[in-house]
Image (cartoon, helix red, strand yellow):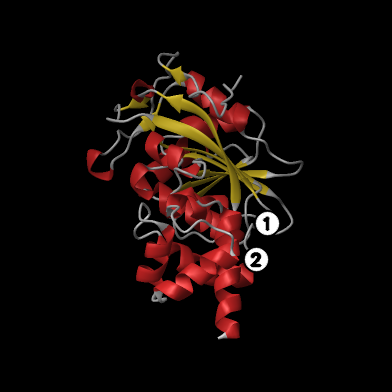
């Protein structure tokens, strides 16, 4: 069973569980590769994956196929994405005869999902994401089309905390994720679950895609322009950050905050998404009046 997380406590850490033998190519240090080898963690990830009827699992970074094999054993249809040629050859040799598996060589930061997932079939995403590429992969999947129903992904623990942060601890990345999805921290994973062990802990996160997003698509660009500029100084008082980074006069910035009912002494990191939308509304309304 997947350990549940709560808002008040840190999810349990997996210190030691049975490990599987890792067949296939060895990880390359130059690529920052850490292959998940813990059979208990693999089982917990698969248990967390919720595939809709008739759906497909798109696995990101299949590597040696440990998670791929566990997903297939659970009865799922899997499209396994992998960028490295030597891993593609290994996956094809190890699992390629399984009719429920399609192996695709692709960079998940750029891949067009519609090229390998039929339009009529819903899909979910699972994977142990490479640390260096986790954020762009997640952003690409959240902002692209077609969108997954859910994502269950492993990332560096600090990134997971950022994705699931509450107002008061939010970052620009927090907002860029939570506009599109509800983010839930599931459990932490000890470095010894990997070959070779990384220097940091990892965490598994579930993202449930919102339909529609919290910000209308036609306003997304304006929304993130405002948020990204203001977040250049997230710990400054919001009226200072707003005036300094958006080019507004101090008087106009304060008028925008009053109209949006936001205390001008708050910091950017304390605002929720609805408050950022209210700030955008107020800014546009006052510009129209001017």
Identify the residue at horizontal 51%, vertical 40% (top origin).
164
The quarter of the displayed image where residue 128 is located: top left
Q: Is residue 107 above or below residue 154?
A: below
Mark 2 or mark 1, earlier in chain: 1
Q: Nearer the viewer's eye, disc 2 or disc 1? A: 2
* Label 2 close to label 1 by CB (< 8 Å): no
- Left or right of 170 on screen, residue 210: right
The circle on residue 216 is: 2
Image quarter where the N terminus lies is top right
The quarter of the displayed image where residue 275 is located: bottom right
Q: In this view of the protein, can residue 108 be seen by the observer?
A: no
Q: Residue furthest left?
A: 30
- Left or right of 289 on screen, residue 135: left
Residue 146 x/y as whole percent: 63, 59
Image quarter where the C terminus lies is bottom right
Residue 198 x/y as whole percent: 29, 30
Crowdedness near tag 2: few (<14), some (14–19) or many (≥20) residues, C-alpha within 10 Å = few
**In-front residue for pair 68/157:** 157
Q: Is residue 238 above or below residue 188?
A: below
Residue 44 x/y as whole percent: 55, 24
Classify mark 2: helix, strand or loop: loop
Q: In this view of the protein, can residue 123 be seen by the observer?
A: yes
Kindly report the distance in space between the C-alpha atoms of the residues bearing marks 2 and 1: 26 Å
- Left or right of 202 on screen, residue 76: right
Residue 274 x/y as whole percent: 61, 56
Q: Is residue 253 above or below residue 99?
A: below
The circle on residue 281 is: none
Q: Name the residue beneath numbered marker 1.
A: 118
Classify mark 1: helix, strand or loop: loop
């Amino acid at each position: 069973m997947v350990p549940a997380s709560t808002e008040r406590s840190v999810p349990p850490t997996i210190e030691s569980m049975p490990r599987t033998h890792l067949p296939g190519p060895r990880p390359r240090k130059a690529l920052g590769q850490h292959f998940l080898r813990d059979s208990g963690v693999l089982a917990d990830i698969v248990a967390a994956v919720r595939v809709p009827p008739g759906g497909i699992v798109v696995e990101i970074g299949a590597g040696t196929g440990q998670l791929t094999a566990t997903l297939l054993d659970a009865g799922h249809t899997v499209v396994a994405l992998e960028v490295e040629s030597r891993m593609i050859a290994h996956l094809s040799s190890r699992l390629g005869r399984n009719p429920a598996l399609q192996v695709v060589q692709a960079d998940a930061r750029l891949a067009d999902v519609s090229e390998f997932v039929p339009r009529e079939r819903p899909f979910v995403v699972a994977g142990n994401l490479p640390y260096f590429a986790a954020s762009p992969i997640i952003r690409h999947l959240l902002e692209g089309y077609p969108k997954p129903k859910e994502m269950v992904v492993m990332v560096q623990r600090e990134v997971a905390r950022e994705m699931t942060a509450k107002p008061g601890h939010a970052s620009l990345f927090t907002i860029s994720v939570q506009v599109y999805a509800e983010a839930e921290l599931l459990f932490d994973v000890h470095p010894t679950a990997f070959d070779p062990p990384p220097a940091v802990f990892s965490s598994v996160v579930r993202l449930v895609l919102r339909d529609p997003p919290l910000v209308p698509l036609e306003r997304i660009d304006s929304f993130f322009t405002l948020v990204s500029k203001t977040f250049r100084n997230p710990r400054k008082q919001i009226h200072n950050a707003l005036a300094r980074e958006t080019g507004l006069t101090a008087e106009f910035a304060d008028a925008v905050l009053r109209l949006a009912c936001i205390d001008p002494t708050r910091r950017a990191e304390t605002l929720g998404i609805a408050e950022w939308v209210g700030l955008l509304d107020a800014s546009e309304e006052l510009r129209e009046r001017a």
